[in-house]
Amino acid sequence: MDIKLTKHDKRYIEGTDDVYSIMQRVLLRDNQIDQEKEHLWMIGMNQAGYILYIELIALGSYKSVDVEPMNVFRVAVMKNASRVILVHNHPSGSLTPSDADKDITDRLIQVGRILNIDLIDHLIITPKTYISFRSIKLMDELEQSLKYVPTYQVVERIRKEEKLIAKEKLAVANSKVKTAEEKAKIAKLAEKKERELKERLVQALAKKEVSVEQIAIIMEIDVKDVQKILKKKTAKIKE
């Protein structure tokens, strides 16, 4: 359902306060009909931040709302939106993102990438206040998630990031400006980055039910190293 802007609403989004200013009025207006239900809206914009549309994507129960990812972007494709913001309310008044909130955002980020449409933020709102996934760094975390990334793309990312790390190491080795101490420090950071990348990607492949043997081949490491990384992850969860 298309949401009409009033004469009091801004047409350009410059920050999260602008989004909340508009959606607070929409929420209060819609609440006259469905006060105890979760609403999920999407704001579609062009690259300059001009609002092309606001659509009510789904209307749920008092504590949840079901979303079909491809339907979320249907209007965005039709309206040629290049950037979108997701907004939903919590009738309970809580601003804490649920696991379901995080999961749907994770999925929509990946669908948006396929369609070349950026999901730039997700706001949880109440009649009095709001929280932005971007402002609390949750959006950054979800953008790094590999949960819904196809396995072949995970492998491509592995190769790309490995090349970047190798390039950094080579630049440090060839540097004539930095002192030996600075080189050692940078090299240590690069090794740490490489180790963390390896662990993160091994875990991501394991979640996609890729066998330990296949992970070892993809990552070009020993099977025992893969098992050690997965065991380390299990130990952390138990703690």
Image (cartoon, helix red, strand yellow):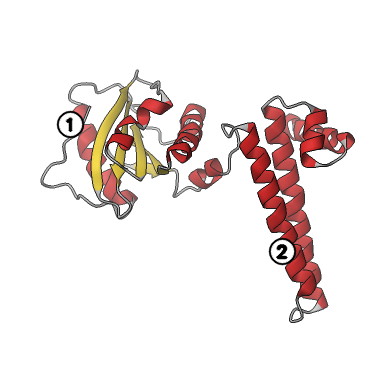
- SS of the residue at dot 1? helix
Residue at image position (16%, 36%) is 4
* Residue type (three-letter) at the residue carrying disc 1: Arg
Camera-nearest residue between 217 and 11? 217
Provide residue 117's location: percent of width, then percent of height.
40, 42
Residue at (84, 32) in percent of width and height: 227
Within-10-Å neighbours for mark 2: few <14, some 14–19, many 20+: some
Q: Name the residue tied to disc 2.
A: 168
Rendering coords of residue 24 (x, y %): 24, 39
What residue is disc 1 on? 29
Residue farthest toward the bottom in the current orientation of the protein: 177
Residue at x 36%, y 29% (from the top left corner): 72
| Along the viewing direction, whichever of 5 and 38 lies nearer the viewer | 5
Quarter occupied by residue 191 = bottom right
Q: Is residue 232 at all visible to an observer of this figure? A: no
> Between disc 2 and disc 1, whose residue precedes?
1
Determine whether 132 is above or below 38 in the image. Answer: below
Query: In the picture, residue 30 is in which quadrant?
Result: top left
For this orientation, the residue located farthest to the left is: 7
| Camera sees residue 23 | yes
Tell whether 126 sits left or right of 148.
left
Q: Secondary structure at mark 2?
A: helix
On the picture, is 154 further left or further right than 123? right
**Mark 2 and mark 1: Cα distance apart in space:** 54 Å
Residue type at mark 2?
A: Glu
Name the foreground residue: 150 vs 207: 150
- Quarter of the figure with the C terminus: top right
